[in-house]
Image (cartoon, rainbow, N blue to C red):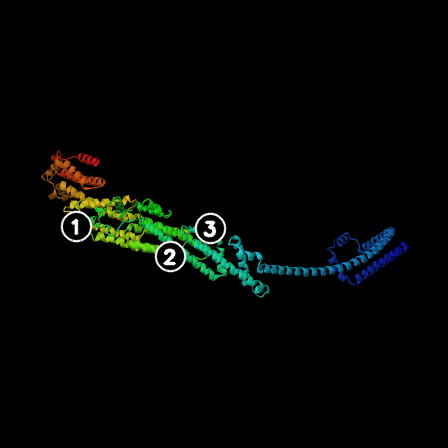
Amino acid sequence: MEAVPAAEALDGHKDRFDLGVFVGDLALDEEVTSDDESLGGLQQELDNCKNDKEVANILANGIKLREYTKGVENNIRQIELDSIQDYIKESENLVLLHDQIRDCDNILSQMEMVLTGFQTEIGSISSEIKVLQEKSMDMGLKLKNRKAAESKLSKFVEDIIVPPRMIDIIVDGEVNDEYMKTLETLSKKIKFIDADPMVKSSKALKDVQPEVERLRQKAVSKIFEFVIQKFYALRKPKTNIQILQQSILLKYKYTITFLKEHAKEIYAEVRAAYIDTMNKVLSAHFRAYIQALEKLQMDIATSTDLLGVETRSTGFLFSIGKESLKTRSSVFALGERISVLKEIDQPALIPHIAEAKSQKYPYEVLFRSLQKLLIDTATSEYLFTDDFFGEESIFHDIFAGPIQVVDEHFNAVLLNCYDAIGIMLMIRIIHQHQLIMFRRRIPCLDSYLDKVNMSLWPRFKMVFDLHLNSLRNATIKTLWEDDVHPHYVTRRYAEFTASLVHLNVEHGDGQLDLNLERLRMAIEDLLVKLAKMFSKPKLQTIFLINNYDLTIAILKEAGTDGGKAQLHFEEVLKSNIAIYVEELLQEHFSDLIRFVKTRPADETATSSEKVSIAEVEPLVKDFASRYKAAIELMHKDVITSFSNFLCGMEILRAALAQLLLYYTRLTECVKKINSGSALNKDLVSISSILFEIKKYSRTF
């Protein structure tokens, strides 16, 4: 770019200045012309410019527009001249700036050429990178596919190949932990060959499959011999079966799993061999245990040991030895026999130890021991077979024999059992064993225990009905004894009832309560019949009181509330005591009682019913003369009549209290007589009578 001379630049500016003046003058001329031509539009323009501050200021000052325009033009010209002078002063700088701009333009052109070259090179590099990226992705995909193929191929080779070490262990190795691991590996290979359809179409299978099959057959053969040998070890005498099962058989339980998966026919043979072995072994064990227990059995009751059977007819009076007396006392009384329920979790009896000590036990003790051994053995066998064979059904095949042995023994014993208390104890034992099995969560003996329970209840009902019928059909003349003291049948009944009530406290069996109510009615009828054998009513009442009192005492001693029976006997005892009190007082103070009862107790007596001195005087004097002796006789009568001294004391107190009541009413009658004061000297004071009552109450 060439520099422009300053003079030429100034001339150009001047030309532009003159042109501006010309244009301004032309504008003014046009404005004058337009004023002449269109004054109508002036008002509109003024309206548009009235809001302009500059225009508003000009109009406000009264300045003429033409003069103001000239002033503005002069200012513009002056500014233009000043600007030209500035350009002239800076002309050298402008020339220098122009040179610098031209140099920069050259440099930028060179840079543009370089950058264009760079851009071309970067474009080619980007293409190369894209090609490399595509190749890299292709190689990555190929690598991924090759790895997947390698993984499948290596797994295939690993699963199908048969290492020489495996062949050596399966063929020549002993059955041990290493053999078990190798057996698991062989099982995986067999499953791989059978399950994967791709393997069946491979050529490698044709080479490997025969070898795998030979190894399978060899392993099955060796396992069968090993397991059968261990099963036969269970048959050896004095072998601890549970230790052998837990320490040896369970250690090699995978052998059974292998047979179940790869040799089902051989597994069926092994299963049958174990069932046969354990069935015979356990049956023999239980048979021997039952035979040993039978030697320890103590006979408690026979078919003639019933509540209503005469003592002499059972031969009890002629029995010999303390043991016989002891067993006879257990026929109706629970006593220490209850301890068998407290020992429910104790281990089973060891027969040879008990036999060495010459110990004998009621059958319920032997029953508990046998059932305890059965449930413990069943629990152990159930858990073992479930773990070893993985089957619960095998247990029932094994225990069919032992349960049959136990059933045969139990049914034979139950058929000849007449011990109602023993049967009820066995019912409670079975219930406890059911709870034990429930807590263990072992259901294998549920049906057996239910069956035993269902066998015990009918037998109990039959024996109970024998006792009930013995009371209902008892021969009164045979049982009657000329003695007002408690009858032995009453003691039997009370002990028998107390025993059953005690065994029913925690169970609340309603059917048993109904049976006890029937038994209570039967004994009460029997006692009434026996009482009628006495000629005197007083002796009849004494007999009933003694028997009722004994029954209540035994029911209380049993440690229970006695149930409904005790409440009933307390009521009938109270009514019979009231009857006896009246009979006793009638015997000694009949005239006094007759007089008092024939007179109204209130003050409503009419004039015809008024009492005279002649009527009461003999009564007053008679009572005063012999009341002490009569009380003494009453005391002796009570002492000799009642077996229970506490009951006798209560009866004597009731009789004396009733006597005091009768005499008090007599004294009230005397006081109502007009001339009754004449008898005051013969009246016995209430305090004197109370003194006598207290005296005999203390000495009784």
Which mark is on residue 477? 1
Residue 694 image point, x, y percent = 20, 35
Q: Quadrant of the C terminus?
A: top left
Displayed quadrant of residue 161: bottom right
Residue 404 drawn at (x, y percent): 35, 57
Q: Disc number at residue 401?
A: 2
| Front of the two marks 2 and 1 | 2
Q: Nearer the viewer, residue 393 or 11?
A: 393
Q: CA distance from mark 2 to mark 1?
A: 53 Å
Q: Which mark is residue 247?
A: 3
Looking at the image, residue 40 sits to the left or right of residue 280; the answer is: right
Q: Nearer the viewer, residue 146 or 606?
A: 146
Circles 2 and 1, Cβ within 8 Å, touching? The answer is no
Local packing at callout 1 (Cα closer than 10 Å; few below 14, some 14-19, many 20+) is: few
Whether residue 666 is visible, yes or no, is yes
Q: Is residue 407 left or right of residue 125?
A: left
Category of crowding for the residue at label 2, using alpha-carbon neighbours closer than 10 angstroms: few (below 14), some (14–19), many (at least 20): many
The quarter in which the N terminus is drawn is: bottom right
Cα separation, mark 3 vs mark 2, equals 25 Å
**Lower position in the chain sequence, tag 3 or tag 2:** 3
Three-letter residue code for mark 1: Lys
The residue furthest left is 614
CA separation, marks 1 and 3? 71 Å
